[in-house]
Amino acid sequence: MIKITFPDGSVREYAAGVTGMEIAESISSRLAQEVLACSVNGVTVELNRPITEDAEFRLFKWEDPEGKHAFWHTSSHLMAEAIQELWPGTQFGIGPAIEQGFYYDVMPPEGVVISESDFARIEQKMMELQQRKENLVRSEISKSDALKFFADHGQNYKNELIEDLEDGTITTYTQGAFVDLCRGPHLLSTAPIKAVKVMAVSSAYWRGDEKRPQMTRVYGVSFPKKKLLDEYLQMIEEAKRRDHRKIGKEMELFMFSELVGKGLPMWLPKGTALRLRLEDFLKKIQKRFGYQQVMTPHIGSKNLYITSGHYAKYGKDSFQPIHTPEEGEEYMLKPMNCPHHCAIYAWKPRSYRDLPLRLAEFGTVYRYEQSGELHGLTRVRGFTQDDAHIFCRPDQVKDEFLRVMDIILIIFKALNFQNYEAQISLRDQVNRDKYIGSDENWERAEQSIIEACQEKGLPARIEYGEAAFYGPKLDFMVKDALGRRWQLGTIQVDYNLPERFGLEYTGADNLKHRPVMIHRAPFGSMERFVAVLIEHTAGRFPLWLMPDQAVVMPISDKFNDYGHEVARQLEMLGVRTTIDDRSEKIGRKIRDNELKHIPYLVIVGEKETAEQTISVRKQGEGEMGSMKVEAFAKIVNDLVDEMTKEF
């Protein structure tokens, strides 16, 4: 008999070789109909995989990210099978599940171009194949047999992937006539896939290498019910309306220029004001929590990143070193701030009385992203992190971790992110090669995070294999107004960088000790955070954050002088105000300024000029009536004070 431990801590005994589906059936026949995959000791697997030893066990349904992953991974195979039937001779690259759906990289036969006009054919063929309810059969074969099989079937890209694998067992999955090189996990069959939609097609270099062939990347999404697909498509349409690139242009927040360079955003005056307001907001909180601001250069010696280990891990994703013309030195555009902060810590001797030392910086960093992967503010080549690094004693780690959690929760409340969950990212349980540092330090760091979440009463999902290479982390996953998940706010415990930089402090025992380093960035990056905030609010930011809180609109040119006087008074009274004095009809001005999401529309005409009043409309709510400028300013300032009283 083996013992199966469930997430609630309960334990049941089963015969060795029991499968996830059999466990589900032993709990509830209805549950067995709903589950899509399971995990054994943190590894997600198919429901028909036998369990031969004591294990921690979870079942996943459609509502769980792991369930969706297995569902969409299987759907990518179904789409590949459909493409194979429609265009025999197609070669296949990779076909993973992604956050919203899946894609497959394919190389169609010569002369075939898959385009949007083919989407309906692919969807029809997928549903035709789905009707067969084909089982996905997992097989284990030798590397040599795998190479022969895929060579015989003309799958050169698969063979290249196999060549890179270590010698040993290779796994394939078969459904119908389609066989794929894959590690899984998958559904047991294609039967649960009831609705599919091919979403897009693009080009993608094989293995992300611009020197390799361009493949056709076909994106899709699928659901267990047509109703869910319909809701998803409605959400996509709403997302287009909320696209931060579109709204950012309408509100004149930021811009890009091919002349300046791809992926390098430039903040316009209104966007700069918004961004600085966010920075001031966080600086005020950080000051309360004992942080000190620092500033570091935009470049650093290559040796700095060799010492930190970042060059070995991320050198190819960074801009390549700049060579000085005479001294022969090598510098890099700064890809991250933490090595610089380690250098600041090491600047002078530290005592246990100096700790914790909390260093914060809004530091701009640079990463090389493929041009095809750039996307507005969410994927850029230059971005500013709201970075901070806490150097503390081992006995201070948990308290510091809890304090950072407090900061993140204050931010979420102030910006109305109400729907969020925490994710504890730990090492891969099997492959430890990609991590630096001792097992002892990793175990201490991981346990500190788990205990902090328990003490805070914060429910947290554990994800194995998602840790940074230098330490485990806690990520806050936020759901926006459309239900999309974004990773905002991260805290990482690091015992490794202090070791690599030889950081020390003198303890109460007068001996040298190694500090612990905590990395934290509540926003993540200013660019990505603003993009998420735009799409979450559809450009209707909290009143305290809006670049323009009011716009004054004279109904004709002859009232422009009074309009400018009203705008000046409102600015003097603390209300951020702009004026629309164009020679346009008032109806046009109202429509245009509503598109800019300005909260209050202030109208002045003959009556208002004579009475020295203003007429006010609130965005989305309508008329507020006629009032004195001072009365309106008090309404706005009182609302802002109420919103910001906690920070």
Image (cartoon, rainbow, N blue to C red):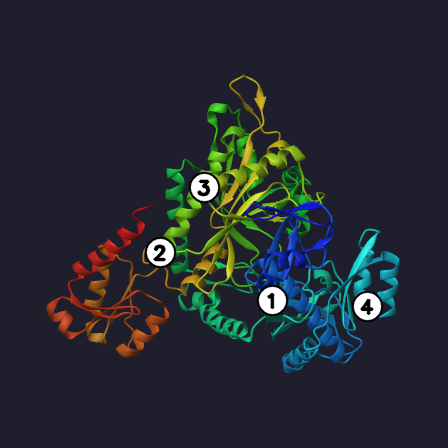
In the image, taking residue 200 as reference, residue 389 lies left or right, namely left
State yes or no: discs 3 and 2 in contact (Cβ < 8 Å). Answer: no
| Observer able to see residue 321 | no
| Residue drawn 20% across the image and 61% down it | 632
Q: Quadrant of residue 211?
A: bottom right
The structure residue drawn at horizontal position 58% and vertical position 27%, both measured from the top left corner, is 514
Between the C-alphas of marks 4 and 3, the distance is 52 Å
Q: Which residue is mark 3?
A: 456
Residue that numbered label 1 is attached to: 101
**Type of amino acid under label 1:** Gly
How far apart marks 1 and 4 lie (CA) works out to: 24 Å
Q: Nearer the viewer, residue 488 or 617?
A: 488
Q: Helix, strand, or loop for circle 1? A: strand
Q: Label 3 amino acid?
A: Lys
The residue positioned 70% from the left and 46% from the top of the image is: 2
Is residue 271 shown left or right of residue 57?
left
Q: Which residue is mark 4?
A: 155
- Residue 249: x and y in percent read 44, 67
- Residue 362 spot, x, y in % from top left: 47, 46
